[in-house]
Image (tube, rainbow, N blue to C red):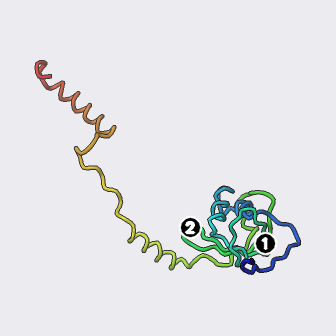
């Protein structure tokens, strides 16, 4: 029984695990987050769906994966040797799909703002448990009121 035909990839040259490269390039905060995204079958390498974090990538491979609210399409330029600063990480890849125009981004943000629920309302006075500030105000009020009342009413 044969599976679907896989595209041919160059096998010569150095390679690195896909989860490690995504972490080096600072697309994910940890290798485990990168591995979870890969194992959830949300990453393509040169059009091929990848589901194993140990998949070896090489310079020249094109990665397609979701990140936040956008789809990232990047070409690997270098494998890197460490997770360095962001400026160093940006030299590891070329972004093939640049971010949307500021006008498009603003329209999307406005749409998201209109679709989001209203901010949480403040607790009405006297409803629920008093806050620390409420308690302190009440204590000050009682201290002042206690000075004004005769001793038999306190």
> In the structure shown, which secondary structural element does the residue marked by tag 2 occupy?
loop
Residue 62 at what x, y percent from top left?
73, 76
Q: Which residue is mark 1?
A: 77
Residue 93 at what x, y percent from top left?
74, 71
Residue 88 can be seen, yes or no: no
User: In the shown orientation, is residue 146 left or right of residue 70?
Assistant: left
**Residue 85 vertical placement versus 135 (above, below):** below
> In the structure shown, which secondary structural element does the residue marked by tag 1 occupy?
loop
Residue at 11% over, 18% down: 152
| Nearest to the observer: residue 64 or residue 140 | 64
Q: How many marks?
A: 2
**Residue 81 vertical placement versus 131 (above, below):** below
**Residue 147 vertical placement versus 40 (above, below):** above
Residue at 75% over, 62% down: 54
Q: Which mark is residue 68?
A: 2
Q: Which mark is residue 124?
A: none
Q: Residue furthest right?
A: 12
User: In the shown orientation, is residue 111 left or right of residue 3?
Assistant: left
Residue at 53% over, 77% down: 102
Residue 63 at what x, y percent from top left?
70, 73
| Nearest to the observer: residue 83 or residue 60 | 60
User: In the shown orientation, is residue 153 left or right of residue 126?
Assistant: left
Q: Which quadrant does the C terminus fall into?
A: top left
Residue at 88% over, 70% down: 13
Q: Residues within 10 Å of mark 1 (few under 14, many from 20)?
A: some
**Residue 76 vertical placement versus 142 (above, below):** below
Residue 104 can be seen, yes or no: yes
**Label 1 – label 2 distance at C-alpha:** 23 Å
| Sequence-first tag of 1 and 2 | 2
Residue 135 at what x, y percent from top left?
29, 35
């Amino acid at each position: 029984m044969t599976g679907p035909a896989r595209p041919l990839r160059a096998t010569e040259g150095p390679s690195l695990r896909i989860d490690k490269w995504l972490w080096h390039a600072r697309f994910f905060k940890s290798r485990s987050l990168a591995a979870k995204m890969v194992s959830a079958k949300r990453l393509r390498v040169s059009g091929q769906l990848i589901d194993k974090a140990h998949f070896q990538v090489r310079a020249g491979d094109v990665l397609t994966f979701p990140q936040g609210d956008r789809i990232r399409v990047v070409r690997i330029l270098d494998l890197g040797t460490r997770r360095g600063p962001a400026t160093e990480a940006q030299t590891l890849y070329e972004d093939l799909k640049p971010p949307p125009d500021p006008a498009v981004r603003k329209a999307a943000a406005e749409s998201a703002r209109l679709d989001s629920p209203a901010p949480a309302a403040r607790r009405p006075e006297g409803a629920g448990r008093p806050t620390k500030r409420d308690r302190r105000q009440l204590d000050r009020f009682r201290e002042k009121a206690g000075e004004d009342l005769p001793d038999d009413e306190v």
